[in-house]
Amino acid sequence: MPLGMVVLAKQVPDTKKITGQAMNDDGTVNRSALPAVFNPEDRYALEAALEIRQRFGGTVTVITMGPPAACELLREALFMGADRVVLLTDRRAAASDTLATSYILSCAVRHAGQAGTVDLVLCGRQAIDGDTAQVGPQCAEKLGLPQVTYVEEILDVEGGRITARRNVGDGTEVVRCPLPALVTVTDTFQEPRPWSAKALMKCKHARAPLELEREAAAAQGGAAGKAKAGGKAGGAATAAERKVAQAVAKRAEALKARGLLIEQWTLDDIEADLSWCGRDGSPTKVKRIQSVVLKGSGHQEFQNTEEDISRLVHLLIEDHTIG
Amino acid sequence: MIRVNPKGEVWVFVEQEDGRLHEVGLELLSKGRELADRLGVPLAACLLGYNVEGLAEQLVRYGAEKVYVADHKLLARYQTNPYAATMVQLVEAHEPQIVVYGATPLGRDLAPRIASALRAGLTADCTDLDIGEHAEPSSDETHENLLLQIRPAFGGNIIATIVNFDRWPQMATVREGVMVMPEADPGRTGEIVAFRPRLSETDCPIEIVDRQRTAKRVDLKKARVIVAGGAGVGGKDNFRLVWLLANALGAAVGASRAAVDSGWIEKDHQVGQTGTTVRPALYIAVGISGAVQHRAGMAEAAKILAINSDPSAPIFQVAHYGICGDLNDVIPRLVHAIKAKG
């Protein structure tokens, strides 16, 4: 029986590339200055899903929640071989903590299930911007599914059960879990496959409707944007605005015919209860953010000479640090 | 979620496996003791397992005034669902104000499941906890005596303080090794409260087919002195100098992620955000530039000695002692001086 799989993936700022300029003066993170990347462990989760599809058959849907720019991640997922990709985008989801995020994603998984059963939900163990590792287990709880965390190898999928090897820090554990289930995948899983050249040629033109609007507005020049704002105030659409809307509709139709229109969902589409979403739905609140400051007090410099080094060793023995 | 209950207890979930307590639970009892004293409420430990009553007395000696023991055969081996169900039942029955867990693979598998079921807040991998107030900008209200949950984020580039003032209990997982291990006091007394969880076989959907434990070859957490090498060491051959110095001092060998990724040393030795957090009496950083991710794991060392040929390396800013020079000269000189004094 082919498996219905959903991969939850996130586009994240590349925290390894943070430099001094990436922090604002008030210590907050200047996200726009950081390159956005496919969260590393989510890529391993997609690899796990594609591996399962290859060995046991099935379909792979990738859902990402984020701004339209996250479509870049969805295109990469298509290049790797995903069957279906979805952009979940809604301003009301902003400022969600892990609990609210899990709730929204669980609604999205349920909504994806309307097109076919979902047997397995996969996501990376954690995202590199928050490193919480909470969204996977919380999403499993919200969906009422058993969870298998820290998976580094899929051993078998058979008889409605998945057998996987988990990396539990001081060793490994092989577990068998009935489907449907949720698994989180670590970066000790096999390396994600490279993009397929064929998929790249076909899918590089894939766009979400919001991207098409932006591209069309840009093509019309800044005037269209202004016209749009003015049109709203005045009630009637301007000629420029109508032109943009027509161009968008035309391109969307053409993409859809070729299977290249990225699905786009809002919180209304997935029937999320708004009181569970965004800041209102988030029990944890950020009280304060501080940028890391080096201490550097009481520093003592020693020269690279025998005398100085001997003096240092003497000092360390004197205060019982060593010896 | 449970009601906001300022009289509620402070709870520590203590991890055990095969009848042995995980150290992080004891570390958390020392921090929990401090928080409970600040709030003027009792400190309790939650012990789940099968035939584990014997461990409860130990927890009292480490500072718990109360130990809730859920002893059930379905809790013999850790499994997410029955453990989460038991904790949810305990929380709903006793309404603690704070529940903390070790940020171990087990704790980070379990705590989010409990938080989601309770619809309560949870902060991951805290490096410090405190009690304080929070003025909420959206309501102009000030909430007093909240748990301040302090953690690094964005790869260690920022430190965030998180609060949860309305959807209790306030919960956090806490990184291993960052809280001080308490001394056991045989004179302490406490109450042991048996709790009978409502569990059935359907709560245990997962079958554990096989378990392999790899004994840790290095125990960096227990080392008094650590000599750690980084990218600046330059190669696997040169890493011998790090071992040489460690042997002269009877020290453990640590490494930065760069050295581990280069294949000069095994991952067991890695110190830092994705490795072990250490707080030795002396940490000698050899050829380690001092990226935030590394500092996150060693900045709490009592003394830090940095050896680096780059005078602008950030490690010098956190070090108490610094030697700027080539490790090929510095290490033999150090070893010579140590042997001469010893």
Image (cartoon, coloured by chain):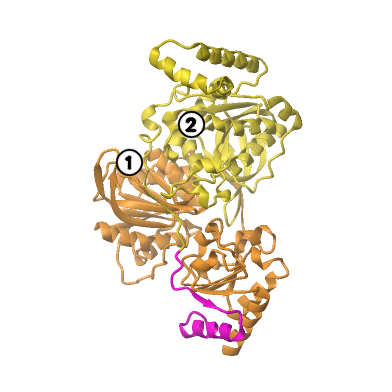
Kindly tell me whether residue A285 is visible in this rendering. Answer: yes
Q: Name the residue under label 2.
A: A106
Q: Residue A301 magenta-drawn?
A: yes
Q: Mark 1 lies on which chain?
A: B
Position of residue A315 measured from the top left corner of the image (x, y, whole percent): 49, 83
Local crowd size for mark 1, using a 10 Å CA cut-off: few (<14), some (14–19), many (≥20): some
Q: Quadrant of the N terminus of chain A?
A: top right
Residue A221: image quadrant is: top right
| Residue at the spot 41% in from the left edge and 43% down from the top edge | B114
Identify the residue at the far right of this view. Answer: A197
User: Which residue bears the numbered disc 1?
Assistant: B167
> Which chain is depicted orange?
B
Q: Nearer the viewer, residue B233 or A32?
A: A32
Span shown in magenta: A295-323
Give residue A189's position: percent from left, percent from top.
Answer: 65, 45
In the image, B35: left or right of A186? left
Above or below A172: residue B24? below
Residue type (three-letter) at the residue carrying disc 2: Ser
Q: Where is residue B19 in the image (x, y as percent from the top left)?
A: 48, 60
Amino acid type, mark 1: Arg
Task: State yes or no: residue A141 in magenta.
Answer: no
